[in-house]
Image: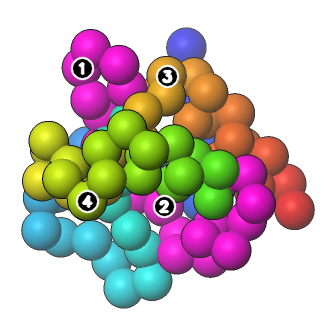
């Protein structure tokens, strides 16, 4: 069953590679297979999202294997964080 988070969307929902709307940031999330999400840049000021970015920095530094920002967590954990940000 699918659901929609108003603040984020996947590349299948209109954010194809190289086509990120103004005010948004593309990130890759997942363990074995990475999924591309596009999130509002307003998330960057959130402590919970900054924690995810710190994890990415610790694991990858500035050399991200997907060519974009890769966050090393499960897709479910990422969705939980972004869901909490949408309720603020």
Q: CA distance from mark 2 to mark 1?
A: 19 Å
Mark nearest the camera among 4 and 3 is 4
Question: SS for tag 3?
Answer: loop
Q: Nearer the viewer, residue 36 or 63?
A: 63
Chain part drawn in magenta: 30-49
Q: Tags 2 and 3 in contact by the CB under 8 Å rule? A: no
Question: SS for tag 2?
Answer: strand
The residue beneath circle 3 is: 74
Q: CA distance from mark 4 to mark 3?
A: 20 Å
Quadrant in which residue 30 is drawn: top left
Tell me residue 1's x, y (percent): 55, 14
The residue beneath circle 4 is: 62
Tell me residue 52's x, y (percent): 57, 46
For the point 45% across and 83% down, which residue is it? 23
Q: CA distance from mark 1 to mark 3?
A: 10 Å
Q: Which numbered circle lies on residue 33? A: 1
Q: CA distance from mark 4 to mark 1?
A: 20 Å
Mark nearest the camera among 2 and 1 is 1
Tell me residue 11's x, y (percent): 26, 48
């Amino acid at each position: 069953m699918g659901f929609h988070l108003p603040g984020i969307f996947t590349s299948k929902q209109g954010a194809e590679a190289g086509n990120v709307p103004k005010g948004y940031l593309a990130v890759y999330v997942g363990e074995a297979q990475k999924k591309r999400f596009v999130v509002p840049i307003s998330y960057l000021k959130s402590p919970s999202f900054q924690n995810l970015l710190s994890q990415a920095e610790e694991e990858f530094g500035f050399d991200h294997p997907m060519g974009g920002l890769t966050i090393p967590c499960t897709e479910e954990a990422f969705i939980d964080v972004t869901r909490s940000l949408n309720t603020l």
